[in-house]
Amino acid sequence: MTNRERAMNILHYKSVDRFPAVHFGYWRELLAEWAALGKIPVELSKGWSDGNPVDKELDKLIGWDFDWTPRYSPRNGLFPAFEEKVLEVLPDGTKRTLNADGLIQRFSPGVVSIPAEDDYLLKDREAFETLYKPKMQFTPERINYEYLKDFNTEVYDKLDYPVGLGVGSAIGTIRSMESVVGMSYLLYDEDEDLFGDIIDTFAELQYQCTKAVLETGAHFDFAHYWEDICFNSGPLLNPKIIEKYCRKHYERRNELLHSYGIDIISLDCDGVTRDLQELWVDTGVNVLFPIEVGTWGDQFGPARRKYGKRQLGVGGFNKLALREDKAAVDKELERIRPLAMEGGYLPCPDHRLMPGTKFELVQYYAEEIKKLKI
Amino acid sequence: MNVFESIADSLERGRAKEVSAKVTEALDNGVSPEQILNEGLVVGMNVIGEQFKNNEVFVPEVLVAARAMNAGLKILKPYLQKEGVEPVGKAVICTVKGDMHDIGKNLVKMMIEGQGIECIDLGVDVDPQRIVDAVKESGAKLVCLSALLTTTMYGQKDVIDALKAAGIRDQVKVMVGGAPVTQAFADEIGADCYTLDAASAAKAARAYFD
């Protein structure tokens, strides 16, 4: 069996000769750490991103089979994006920059963490109508028609990983444009209609992009949303607001995907997602990812028990065990084994591997997970 | 609804302008600024904190309520100072070295201020020595440290070590929080307090000063 077949079989509750070793990438600091320790060549500690050639080389060194990531996403964000520029350099070297989404961020010299969000352009209806709406319209140059010619069954038969289509988000990207603070103030300071209009306009764009990709005849094994709309206590916004404004868009986009035979629809959302799971599973988003056990205390088991076989998952292996020892890895593997044996669940470390993660333990995990079969 | 309930109600609904107007009106009518603070603004913020803890309201509601609180406080402050009303206590708050993400820190700050505690906000990506200096200068009895990432959470230990090295660890309580932080981690690094959410952090902070 190929890893592509293994992954798809598991997510369709079919048997496999072994589980694939799936991952979700690395914090770049970890790769630098591994290079300094002589675990990986220095050239592999730079330029990594999901599914790129560096990722593939690291897969070989470690024993991974593939990264759970979409292999193609149309330009379904702001287009043209805002021109990224430095607005100001503060005396301590901190840079205030405008990013492609219109968010103003602060970067301190030498700090690689997520930047601070300082300000945003999308503040009111005028900003939406003049700055954003024109960038949220479908145009053919959003689709790489040439590249998509290779997304066909003949090529796929030679691939050893499942092929995902990025289908955007319903609300996560709006948050990226405004920051949590901006989105909060928008909801309260402006009328809710504006909030709804932004979501509807952006969702229409994402639908048209998805439709245009599928109409090329390109084939995909799964579709993949990105939201990141939760934190350690649950959703960042009231789930009722998300339900009110996003349900119809999930339904419509997922119906389109279903009509093209795509029945595995995953959604990347960090944090504790339980209050949104019902909305997602009801509308056809059936794969939870990455199910952060270690950092945020999320779990796959309760979702599976609540929604039964409708609920699939990728992730859920507490990555913190990979900083400890073999016994900790074994214990975590034992914890997830019963869920894996039910089918419909692909174990994977529950987010980017972080500094302090032991190279040999990651190799060990990859070896051990391949010993499972159903 | 009396004047305090009315102020609290506007605050809970995140109506900053209403809060400002009601606080001004109350002051004009001779209501004590300390009463406006404690029986109006703080009560409203406590309600929001409890609802946030119980997942009845979410981050946006807390942010707009805190903004309304600040609008009220801005008007009250000169009156409180004139009457010699001191803050309940002082706290130094920041995200640790390497961590730029300040939403959690800002939420905790707003909630703590809602308890009548003065916050000395050092901002983001703060060097341990700066925190030590701020504690010495301000006499703060509480240090609140935020970290968003597993890559930066160990910066909280660096601060505790710096406080020890400066010989002032015993003079302050250290509260840690942030997405990857757990009670076990707080115990491991020798912090005095960990709470899961901003409302609980504010309650715990107040308890240190009561």
Image: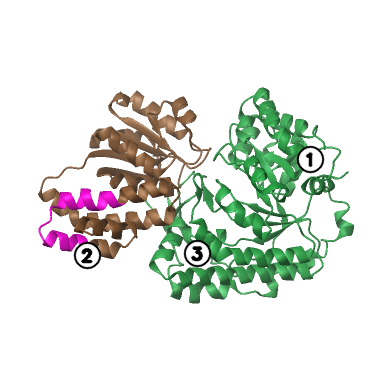
Chain colours: A green, B brown
Is residue A95 or residue A59 the one in the foreground? A59
Secondary structure under the numbered disc 2 in the rendered image: helix
Is residue B89 or residue B41 the one in the foreground? B41
Rounded to the nearest angstrom, the CA distance separating label 1 from label 3 is 39 Å
Foreground tag (2 vs 3): 2
Q: Which residue is mark 3?
A: A102
Q: Which residue is mark 2?
A: B21
- Measured as percent of width and height from the top left, residue B56 is found at 43, 52
**In the image, residue A186 lies in the stretch drawn in magenta:** no
Badge 2 sits on which subunit? B
Which residue sits furthest front?
B1
Rendered residue at 43%/53% (across/down): B59
Badge 1 sits on which subunit? A
Task: In the rendered view, tell whether residue B208 sits above or below residue B44.
Answer: above
Q: Is residue B36 left or right of residue A353?
A: left
Q: Amino acid at mark 2?
A: Ala
**In the image, residue B30 lies in the stretch drawn in magenta:** yes
Secondary structure under the numbered disc 3 in the rendered image: loop
- Secondary structure mostly seen in the magenta stretch: helix
- Measured as percent of width and height from the top left, residue A249 is found at 62, 66
Q: Amino acid at mark 3?
A: Gly
Q: Quadrant of the N terminus of chain A?
A: top right
Rendered residue at 67%/23% (across/down): A327
Q: Residues within 10 Å of mark 2 (few under 14, many from 20)?
A: some
Q: Residues within 10 Å of mark 3 (few under 14, many from 20)?
A: many
What's the mark number on residue B194?
none
Task: In the rendered view, tell whether residue A294 sits above or below residue A102.
Answer: above
Foreground tag (2 vs 1): 2
Q: Which residue is mark 1?
A: A20
Q: Range of the magenta residues?
A: B21-44
